[in-house]
C-alpha cells in the first residue's frame, strides 16, 4: 500500500514535470521515455527530494530505468533514513 | 464489421494480438460476416455489404465453395433431426459408413482396403499417423526379440532331442561378431544376443519428411514441417529425429533408409542340426510423410519419379509411406488423390480440409487394412471425432464429388489447365516480376521474383523481409476486392485455391488485377501498391517521381591499389518524423503527413532493420572505412512511446540492427538519433565483440571547436571571454564545461531552478581538473589562470602532496569566498541577466521549445553554439541580435567532402552528425576503446577531437 502511494505520487511529479497526463504513466515505463535524460533527471530528483524530504545520490540513479524502479528506490531511501529519524526523536 | 461484433472494438487485446498487427500492416484487417460460393461478404464503412472474390478458399477447404446449398440442406436436416453431438463409446454407424466409403474411393485407385481413424483437424490425423506408425515399429521390434527367444527355446528342445549339434565354433563365431570375451554356455550366448538386439533396437527411430513439406502445427506434426519459422521455436521438443529429403532427388531416399539401418544377431538352426549366428537388420524408420503437391511449401508438385523412389524405399525398409492428401486430395488437382497421376500408392492416407464440405471440421487417417493395429482405435481417440454431423456432411461431400462420374473433378482439371495457361502467358510478359507459375488443377502458386533491382527502396525491403506477398494480397483485397494470401512457408508465393465451381469471369477478373500488380512491380510504383496502407481510399498521384538507381545491395568493391582492407562500420538511423518516409522512398512523395504516420504505425515492430545505404569514406591518412547505414524502422515518437509503455520492441529493434551490423561484418556500430536514447547510450545492450558508440564525444569536440573558431573570427578574446553553458547538469553540458575551462576566462553553469545542488559537483569537478592540469605542468590558460593567481590556488599548488580529497569542492567554496563575483565558475539557476553577459553560449538542454530568446543574448558580438535537438536558440535571436552568430553545433564535414546521403537528415553537402563522424573515426583509427558509452569522459573527448583533425574531419561549418 505504501509502495503504491509512492508510485502514485511519483507519477504525478513526472506528469507535472513532463506535461503529460499522470493516468497515462505506467510503472514499467522507462524514465528516459519521458525525456528524463541526464539533465532532466536532476530536475526530477530535486522535486522528489523536497516532496519526500529525502536526499538522493546521483551515483545511485544509474541503475534505475523504470518509473517503478525509482518508486522502489525512494521507498528504500525512506526506509534507510527511518531508524535515524526514530533515534533522533527519542 | 457486423453490428453484433462492434461491441468488442479492442479485439486484438485478448485474441491473437500479433496476427492482428500483421493483418493491419498488410491491410488485410477485414471481418467477413457472410459467405456464399466463391464470395465472402464484409460491410464497408457505410454499412453496405461488399462481396470479395475468395481465391484463398480457406487454404483449400472451400472446394465446393462456401455454404454449398446441398450441404447446407444436409446440415439443416441434421440439426432438425436433433442428432446427438456427443455419443462417445457407442456404435457410430455414420462414421463407419464414411470409413467404408473413403476406403472404397481410395481403393478404386490403389486396389487396397483401409481402416479409418477420424479427428477434427488435419494436424490431428498427422499425429494419429505418427502414433500408429510408431506402434507398428515398436511391435516389429518386440517381435524381433520374441523371435530370438523362440530360436533359443527351439534350439534347446532340439539339443535335448539330440537333433542339433552345438560346437565350440558357434561360441567363437558369436564372440567374434559381438566383439566380446569368449562365451562359455548357451545361456551366456542367449543373454549376449538379447542384449545386442535390445541395444540396437532401442535407438530412436527416424521419421522421414520432405523439404518444403507442411503437415501441421501440433508438436509431432510440427517436427515434420520443414519451414523453420514454425518448427524451430519448439525444436528442442521434437518427438523423433526427422530427416528432410530434398524433393526430386531419387537417390537420397534409399541412402537415408540405409543410414537408419540397425544391426543385431540371430540364431539359425539348419535342417541338419547345424547352429549358426547370423547378422540381421532393421531399418529404424517410423514412417515417411509426403504431400504429392506441397501446399504451404509454395505449391510444388512432386515428380512421379521421386514418389516412386519413396515407395521403393518404404517397401525395402518395411515402414509405411504416408501420403498427406489434406490440401491436395479429394479432387482439387483434378483427380481424387493428388498422388494418383504418379501411380504410387500409400500405406496411410490423410484427408481433411475439403472433406467436411466447408461446413464440418473433420479429418481422416486411412491405414491399409493389413497394417492396421486393431487396438489403435481404442488406444487413440478424440472427443469430437466420429460424430454424425461431420460424418454425414463428409459423406455428402464425397457424394457430390463422385456425381456424374466425377464431373467436378474434371471441371477442376480443365478450369485449372486453362487458368494455368493464362497465368503462364502473363508470366512470359513479366518474367522479371513473376518468377514461376506452378500447380495442377485448382491448386496454383504464383512465385514473385524478388525485386532486387527495383528503383523502390521500400519494395526491396518488403521483399527481403518476406512481406511483399502480404502487401500484394492487401492491395488485391483493398483495390480489387480479391482475396489471396501467400503460402505459409514460402511468403513470396501467392496461393490460389478457388472452388471447383469458380466462374471463368472471376478468374478473368483476377488475371486483370494480377496484370496491374505486375505493372506496378515493374515500374516500382510502390505508391500505388501500398496506397491502401497510406491514405485509405485516396488515389495516389498520377505520376511516379523520377526513378533513382537502386542503392548497391552488396558492399562496394575495394580499390585494388589499397593494400589495407577497409574497416567496416555501421551507423543506425531511424525516421525522425513519419514524413521522413518520403525522403527515404521518393516514390511516396505524394503521401500525406497522416498517410506516412498511418503507414509507419501499421508497420510498427514488423519490419526488421534494413540496409539503407553503403558508402566508402577515406581519411586524410589514407585509411578507408566501408560504412553501412542501417535503418531502424521506428519514428522518434514511436520509440519514446515504447519506452513510456515499458514495451521492449523498440529496444529489440535496435538490438536486431546491431545483429544486422554484425552479419555485415562491421566492427563499430554508431547509434544515431533516438537509438541512443532507447538503449540508454548503448548501456542497455550487452556486447563484448562490437564497439558500440553513442558518438557523443566527437559531437562535443566538434561543437567546441566550431565555437572557438567562430569566436576568433568575431574577434572575441577567448581567454577573457565568459562562456555560458545552458543545460550544464547534463552529461554533454558538464563535459563541455570541463574542456572549455582550459581556454575561456569565465564559466557560468546554467540549470533549472532547484538544480544548484547538482551544478555544484559539476563546478567542483571542473576546478579539480584545472588544478590537476596545473600540477602536471600544463599552461595557466583558461580558468587555471585565475586559479593559479588566487591565494587559495597558490597555497594548494604549494603543497601538491597534501591536497584534500575533495579539492574541487574546496576550490569552489574558497574561490567564491575569496573572489566573490570574480570567481571563475559561477552557478545560475534563473535565466537571468548573467546569460546576457556571456559572449559565448553553448546550449545542450532537451527542452521541447527554444529556451534562449533575444532578451537572453547580448547586443555585442557573441557566438551561440546550439547542439540541442530540437534547437534551444529561438529563430528570432538571429534577426534581433545581428551581432550574434548562431551555429548548429555537433556537425562535422567528412575528410574529402564525401556525401553520405542520410535520408531526412537535412544537412549540407559533406556534412555529417558528430556521432556518425565518431563512428567513422573509430573505424579509421582502430582506437576502439574511445567509443562513447554512458557518461562522457573529458579525456576521450579531447583525444577524439585530435584524432578527428588528424584524419581530416573539418569543424568549420557555416552558421545556422
Image: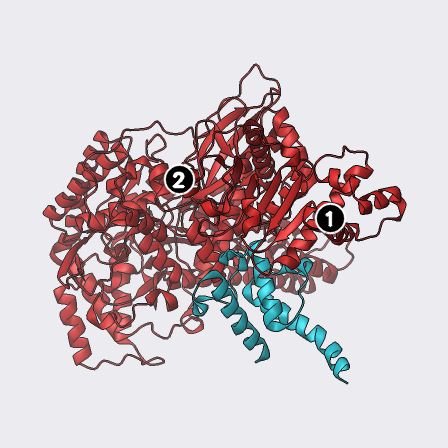
Element under disc 1: helix
Quadrant location, the C terminus of chain B: top left
Any part of residue B37 in sight: no
Residue B830 % position (x, y): 56, 55
Quarter of the figure that contains the N terminus of chain B? bottom left
Report in which chain the residue with disc 1 lies: B
Q: Which chain is red?
A: B
Distance CA(mark 2)–CA(mark 1): 67 Å
Instruction: Give the label on residue B819, or none.
Output: 1
Q: Which residue is more in the foreground, B761 or B462?
A: B761
> Do tags 2 and 1 sit on the same chain?
yes
Residue B371 is situated, as x and y percent measured from the top left of the image, at: 41, 61
> Mark 2 touching mark 1, by CB under 8 A?
no
Q: Residue at x 45, y 69 (%)?
A: A22
Q: Quadrant of residue B428?
A: top left
Q: Nearer the viewer, residue B484 or B120?
A: B484
x%, y% of residue B525? Answer: 26, 36
- Is B857 placed above or below B350 here? above
Q: Is B724 displayed left or right of B58 in the figure?
A: right
Q: Which chain is cyan?
A: A
Tell me the number on the disc at residue B464: 2
Amino acid at each position: 500500500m505504501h509502495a503504491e502511494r509512492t508510485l502514485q505520487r511519483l507519477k504525478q511529479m513526472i506528469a507535472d514535470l513532463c506535461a503529460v497526463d499522470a493516468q497515462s504513466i505506467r510503472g514499467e515505463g522507462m524514465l528516459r521515455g519521458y525525456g528524463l535524460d541526464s539533465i532532466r533527471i536532476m530536475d526530477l530528483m530535486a522535486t522528489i527530494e523536497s516532496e519526500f524530504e529525502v536526499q538522493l545520490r546521483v551515483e545511485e540513479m544509474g541503475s534505475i530505468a523504470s518509473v517503478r524502479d525509482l518508486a522502489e528506490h525512494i521507498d528504500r531511501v525512506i526506509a534507510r533514513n527511518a531508524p535515524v529519524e526514530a533515534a533522533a526523536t527519542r | 464489421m457486423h453490428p453484433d461484433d462492434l461491441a468488442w472494438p479492442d479485439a486484438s487485446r485478448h485474441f491473437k494480438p500479433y496476427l492482428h498487427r500483421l493483418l493491419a500492416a498488410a491491410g488485410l484487417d477485414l471481418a467477413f460476416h457472410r459467405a456464399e460460393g466463391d464470395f465472402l461478404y464484409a460491410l464497408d464503412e457505410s454499412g453496405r455489404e461488399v462481396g470479395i472474390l475468395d481465391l484463398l478458399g480457406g487454404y483449400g477447404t472451400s472446394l465446393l465453395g462456401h455454404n454449398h446449398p446441398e450441404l447446407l440442406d444436409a446440415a439443416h436436416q441434421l440439426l432438425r433431426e436433433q442428432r446427438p453431438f456427443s455419443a462417445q463409446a457407442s456404435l457410430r454407424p455414420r462414421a463407419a459408413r464414411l470409413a467404408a466409403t473413403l476406403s472404397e474411393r481410395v481403393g478404386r485407385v490403389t486396389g487396397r482396403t483401409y481402416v479409418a481413424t477420424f479427428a477434427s483437424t488435419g494436424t490431428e490425423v498427422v499425429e494419429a499417423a505418427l502414433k500408429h506408425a510408431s506402434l507398428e515399429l515398436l511391435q516389429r521390434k518386440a517381435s524381433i526379440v520374441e523371435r530370438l527367444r523362440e530360436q533359443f527355446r527351439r534350439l534347446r528342445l532340439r539339443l535335448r532331442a539330440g537333433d542339433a549339434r552345438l560346437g565350440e565354433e558357434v561360441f567363437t563365431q558369436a564372440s567374434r561378431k559381438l566383439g566380446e570375451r569368449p562365451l562359455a554356455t548357451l545361456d551366456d550366448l542367449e543373454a549376449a544376443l538379447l542384449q545386442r538386439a535390445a541395444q540396437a533396437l532401442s535407438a530412436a527411430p527416424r521419421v522421414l519428411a520432405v523439404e518444403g513439406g507442411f503437415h501441421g502445427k501440433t508438436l509431432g506434426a510440427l517436427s515434420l514441417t520443414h519451414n523453420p519459422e514454425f518448427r524451430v521455436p519448439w525444436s528442442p521438443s521434437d518427438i523423433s529425429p526427422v530427416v528432410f529429403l530434398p524433393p526430386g532427388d531419387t537417390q537420397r531416399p534409399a541412402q537415408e533408409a540405409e543410414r537408419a539401418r540397425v544391426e543385431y544377431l540371430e540364431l539359425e538352426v539348419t535342417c541338419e542340426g547345424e547352429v549358426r549366428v547370423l547378422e540381421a537388420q532393421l531399418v529404424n524408420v517410423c514412417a515417411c510423410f509426403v504431400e504429392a503437391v506441397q501446399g504451404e511449401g509454395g505449391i510444388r508438385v512432386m515428380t512421379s519419379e521421386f514418389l516412386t523412389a519413396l515407395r521403393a524405399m518404404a517397401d525395402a525398409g518395411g515402414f509405411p509411406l504416408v501420403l498427406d492428401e489434406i490440401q491436395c486430395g479429394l479432387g482439387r488437382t483434378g483427380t481424387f488423390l493428388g498422388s494418383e497421376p504418379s501411380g504410387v500408392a500409400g500405406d496411410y492416407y490423410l484427408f481433411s480440409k475439403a472433406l467436411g464440405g466447408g461446413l464440418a471440421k473433420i479429418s481422416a487417417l486411412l491405414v491399409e487394412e493389413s497394417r492396421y493395429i486393431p487396438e489403435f482405435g481404442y488406444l487413440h481417440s478424440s472427443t469430437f471425432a466420429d460424430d454424425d454431423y461431420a460424418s454425414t456432411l463428409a459423406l455428402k461431400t464425397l457424394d457430390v464429388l463422385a456425381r456424374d462420374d466425377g464431373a467436378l473433378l474434371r471441371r477442376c482439371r480443365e478450369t485449372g489447365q486453362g487458368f494455368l495457361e493464362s497465368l503462364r502467358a502473363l508470366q512470359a510478359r513479366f518474367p522479371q516480376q513473376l518468377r514461376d507459375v506452378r500447380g495442377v488443377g485448382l491448386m496454383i502458386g504464383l512465385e514473385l521474383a524478388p525485386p532486387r533491382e527495383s528503383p523502390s527502396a521500400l519494395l526491396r525491403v518488403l521483399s527481403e523481409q518476406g512481406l511483399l506477398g502480404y502487401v500484394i494480397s492487401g492491395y488485391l483485397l483493398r483495390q480489387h476486392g480479391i482475396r489471396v494470401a501467400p503460402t505459409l512457408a514460402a511468403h513470396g508465393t501467392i496461393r490460389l485455391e478457388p472452388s471447383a465451381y469458380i466462374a471463368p469471369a472471376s478468374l478473368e477478373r483476377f488475371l486483370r488485377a494480377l496484370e496491374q500488380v505486375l505493372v506496378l512491380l515493374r515500374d516500382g510504383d510502390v505508391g500505388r501498391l501500398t496506397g491502401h496502407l497510406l491514405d485509405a481510399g485516396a488515389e495516389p498521384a498520377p505520376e511516379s517521381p523520377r526513378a533513382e538507381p537502386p542503392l548497391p545491395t552488396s558492399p562496394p568493391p575495394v580499390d585494388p591499389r589499397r593494400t589495407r582492407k577497409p574497416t567496416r562500420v555501421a551507423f543506425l538511423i531511424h525516421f525522425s518524423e513519419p514524413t521522413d518516409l518520403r525522403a527515404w522512398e521518393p516514390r511516396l512523395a505524394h503521401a500525406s503527413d497522416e498517410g506516412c504516420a498511418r503507414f509507419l504505425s501499421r508497420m510498427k515492430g514488423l519490419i526488421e532493420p534494413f540496409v539503407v545505404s553503403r558508402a566508402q569514406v577515406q581519411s586524410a591518412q589514407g585509411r578507408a572505412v566501408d560504412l553501412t547505414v542501417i535503418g531502424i524502422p521506428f519514428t522518434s515518437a514511436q520509440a519514446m512511446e515504447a519506452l513510456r509503455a515499458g514495451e521492449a520492441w523498440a529496444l529489440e529493434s535496435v538490438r536486431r540492427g546491431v545483429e544486422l551490423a554484425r552479419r555485415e561484418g562491421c566492427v563499430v556500430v554508431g547509434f544515431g538519433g533516438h537509438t541512443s536514447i532507447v538503449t540508454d547510450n548503448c548501456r542497455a545492450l550487452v556486447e563484448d565483440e562490437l564497439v558500440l558508440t553513442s558518438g557523443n564525444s566527437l559531437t562535443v569536440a566538434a561543437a567546441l571547436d566550431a565555437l572557438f573558431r567562430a569566436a576568433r573570427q568575431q574577434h572575441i578574446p577567448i581567454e577573457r571571454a565568459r562562456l555560458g553553458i545552458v543545460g550544464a547538469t547534463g552529461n554533454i553540458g558538464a563535459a563541455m564545461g570541463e574542456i572549455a575551462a582550459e581556454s575561456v576566462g569565465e564559466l557560468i553553469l546554467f540549470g533549472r531552478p532547484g538544480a544548484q545542488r547538482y551544478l555544484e559537483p559539476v563546478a567542483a569537478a571542473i576546478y579539480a581538473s584545472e588544478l590537476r592540469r596545473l600540477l602536471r605542468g600544463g599552461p595557466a590558460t583558461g580558468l587555471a589562470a585565475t586559479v593559479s593567481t588566487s591565494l587559495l590556488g597558490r597555497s594548494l599548488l604549494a603543497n601538491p602532496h597534501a591536497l584534500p580529497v575533495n579539492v574541487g569542492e574546496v576550490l569552489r567554496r574558497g574561490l567564491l569566498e575569496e573572489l566573490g563575483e570574480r570567481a571563475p565558475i559561477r552557478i545560475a539557476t534563473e535565466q537571468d541577466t548573467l546569460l546576457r553577459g556571456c559572449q559565448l553560449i553553448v546550449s545542450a538542454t532537451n527542452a521541447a521549445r527554444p529556451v534562449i530568446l533575444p532578451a537572453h543574448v547580448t547586443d555585442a558580438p557573441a557566438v551561440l553554439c546550439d547542439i540541442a535537438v530540437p534547437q534551444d536558440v529561438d529563430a528570432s535571436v538571429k534577426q534581433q541580435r545581428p551581432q550574434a552568430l548562431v551555429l548548429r553545433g555537433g556537425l562535422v564535414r567528412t575528410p574529402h567532402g564525401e556525401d553520405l546521403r542520410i535520408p531526412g537528415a537535412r544537412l549540407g553537402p559533406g556534412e555529417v552528425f558528430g556521432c556518425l563522424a565518431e563512428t567513422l573515426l573509430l573505424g579509421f583509427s582502430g582506437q576502439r576503446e574511445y567509443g562513447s558509452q554512458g557518461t562522457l569522459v573529458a579525456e576521450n573527448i579531447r583525444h577524439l577531437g585530435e584524432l578527428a583533425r588528424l584524419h581530416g574531419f573539418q569543424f568549420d561549418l557555416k552558421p545556422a
